[in-house]
Amino acid sequence: MTYSDLEYDIFSRQFILQNFDQKNIHKLHDAKITIVGLGGIGCPLSQYLVSSGLKHLTLFDGDRIEKTNLGRQILYSLDDIDKYKSICAKNRLLKTNPYCKITAYSENLTEKNINVLLDADIIIDTSDDWQLSKLINAFCVKNSLQYIFSSAINNNIQICLFKNQINHTCLNCVFPNDQDVELARCDTVGISSICAGIAGLITAQKTINTILKINNENNILSLINSENLSISNIKIKNNADCALNNS
């Protein structure tokens, strides 16, 4: 399969870059991405994936749009208040590329519907829900699925790709706590809109790097402070005590 003439016009400035030969353009075209969470990170993430030529997206979010979302969730407007995020996001993304294949679920991801993730090449978790992140992580480990965890709070960002192949290293290796005990949340300690945007952009770049094999992002925990613009990339390893080692 190839892009239409319209799509080649839309992405022409990107496709002349050295990394975008015909082989990589086909990889981009065929990649299937699932995004769980269409908030402050998921909005710019999905926008820039579509703007970069990604065509096959599955979106999961059971929330409706609130006024407090508009400061950082860039796919929505005042006209969208009380509408489902996933549906509004899909409609907005299709205005960038009407040939995208976008499936939108206006429900939360749970144990009952999680098998939908099996169709994805990469699952990206921007859910801001620790128990859901743990559920997705365990499922991806069990099924050897590539999983990107992306979170932001205040001015701080954490992003990591787990390929979940030989000798797994996973989210549980890095953060083994099972209980969502007094974790900081955006609605209590706040979040910079720019911080959420940067998190979405870096997550999008890591996704493209992984699809095109531009850079090895596997098991690299990126810690970013959006205020002082510091970035630390930490190589993480399997935790021998990880509860998922024998999964």
Image (cartoon, rainbow, N blue to C red):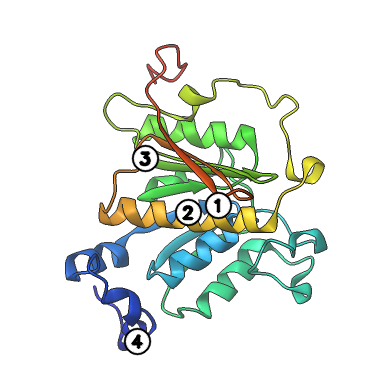
CB-based contact (under 8 Å), mark 3 and mark 2: no
Residue at image mark 4: 9
When asked about the image quadrant of residue 65, the answer is bottom right
Q: Which image quarter is the C terminus in?
A: top left
Residue at image mark 2: 202
Tag 2: residue type?
Ile
Give the SS element for disc 3: loop
Mark 4 vs mark 1: give the one in front: 1
**Residue closer to the observer: 228 or 223:** 228
Give the SS element for disc 1: helix
**Is residue 101 among what the camera can see?**
no
Label 4 neighbourhood size at 10 Å, few (<14), some (14-19), many (20+)? few
Q: Does residue 184 appear to the left or right of 29 in the view shown?
A: right
Residue at image mark 1: 199
CB-based contact (under 8 Å), mark 1 and mark 2: yes
Position of residue 93 measured from the top left corner of the image (x, y, whole percent): 53, 73
Q: Residue at x 29, y 78 (%)?
A: 3
User: Could you tell which of marks 3 and 2 lies nearer the N-terminus?
Assistant: 3
Mark 3 vs mark 2: give the one in front: 2
Give the SS element for disc 4: helix
When asked about the image quadrant of residue 31, the answer is bottom left
Give the number of the disc on residue 145.
Answer: 3
Q: Residue at x 60, y 51 (%)?
A: 37
Position of residue 172 measured from the top left corner of the image (x, y, whole percent): 50, 25
Give the SS element for disc 2: helix
